[in-house]
């Protein structure tokens, strides 16, 4: 399974989860089978609220789940419409912590009711 986690800085498995999906500078994509990762630059990080669409690059990479602290309803709906599951985490966790605890994180799916309606949400 390929898991995407938005990050602010590239620090390998020590990277810290970023607070919001669309404005994250990078996406850390971890492959749970191959046990390797790649980091994508989010070319959509500078955008007006509700106008980002970094979904297609994630789809092209075969991402099956996103783990994030915050995400707007539009991005959530776009991801869900192509079969990508979205789960909530704290923005203070490292990639290593998220990957190690992914089974327990899967218990808290992000929903439209818990999605962000503004940029400063977390």
Image (cartoon, helix red, strand yellow):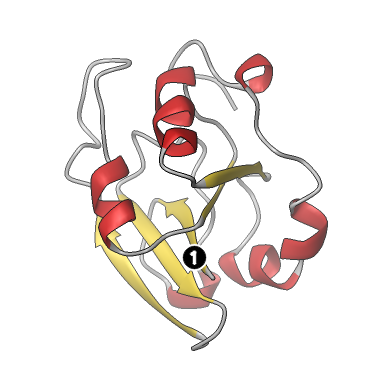
Residue 86, position as x, y percentages in the image: 58, 42
Residue 37: x percent and y percent? Answer: 41, 77
* Residue that protrudes farthest toward the front in the picture: 82
Please state if 22 lies on the left or on the right of 3 as rendered.
left
* Image quadrant in which the C terminus is located: top right
Q: How dense is the environment of label 1, judged by Cα within 10 Å: few (below 14), some, or many (20 and up)? A: some
Residue sitting nearer the eye, 21 or 62:
62
Residue 19 x, y percent position in the rendering: 52, 38
Image point (57%, 46%), residue name:
85
Give the image quarter of residue 26: bottom left
**Residue beneath the point at 60% across and 38% down:** 69
Side of 19 where 99 appears, left or right: right
Which residue is identified by label 1?
15
Element type at mark 1: loop
**What residue is rendered at 49% in x and 36% in y?**
80
Report the quarter where the N terminus lies: bottom right
């Amino acid at each position: 399974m390929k898991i995407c986690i938005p990050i602010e800085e590239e620090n390998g498995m020590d990277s810290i989860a970023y607070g919001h999906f669309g404005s994250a500078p990078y996406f850390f994509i971890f492959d749970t089978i191959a046990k390797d990762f790649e980091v994508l630059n989010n070319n959509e990080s500078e955008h007006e609220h509700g106008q980002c669409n970094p979904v297609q690059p994630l789809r092209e990479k075969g991402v099956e789940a996103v783990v994030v602290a915050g995400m707007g309803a539009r991005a959530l709906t776009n991801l869900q419409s192509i079969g990508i599951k979205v789960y909530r985490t704290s923005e203070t966790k490292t990639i290593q912590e998220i990957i190690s605890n992914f089974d327990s994180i899967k218990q808290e799916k992000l929903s439209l009711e818990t999605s962000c309606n503004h940029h400063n949400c977390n």
